[in-house]
Image (cartoon, helix red, strand yellow):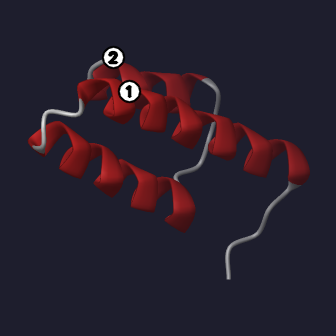
Amino acid sequence: MDGETYLAILKENELKRSKLVKLLEKQVAILYENDLTDLAEETKWLAIDIAEYEKENGVIEI
């Protein structure tokens, strides 16, 4: 999925980009730079899963 789709998923589901999610997004960029596309895609889904978990469980950033 491209970045636009990724952000649309976050917005559609009212998910926040916590510090952890932003860190994973940086990792995605590094993975793409190193032609590790499959791992980058998995990491995007992991970031979405974490954002969903944080929303469901009321995780508060420090």
Residue 18 seen in this snapshot: no
Residue hosting label 2: 1
Residue sitting nearer the eye, 26 or 8: 26
Element at badge 1?
helix
Residue sitting nearer the eye, 5 or 27: 27
Residue hosting label 1: 41
- What's the residue at 51%, 54% (across, down)? 21
Please identify the quarter of the rendering in which residue 36 is found: top left
Element at badge 2?
loop
Q: Is residue 60 left or right of residue 29?
A: right
- What's the residue at 80%, 62% (across, down)? 59
Tell me residue 60's x, y (percent). Answer: 76, 69
Three-letter residue code for mark 1: Glu
Q: Mark 1, residues whose alpha carbon is within 10 Å: few (<14), some, or many (≥20)?
A: some
Total tally of numbered discs in the picture: 2
Closer to the eye: label 2 or 1:
1
- What's the residue at 20%, 51% (across, down)? 30
Tell me residue 15's x, y (percent). Answer: 62, 40
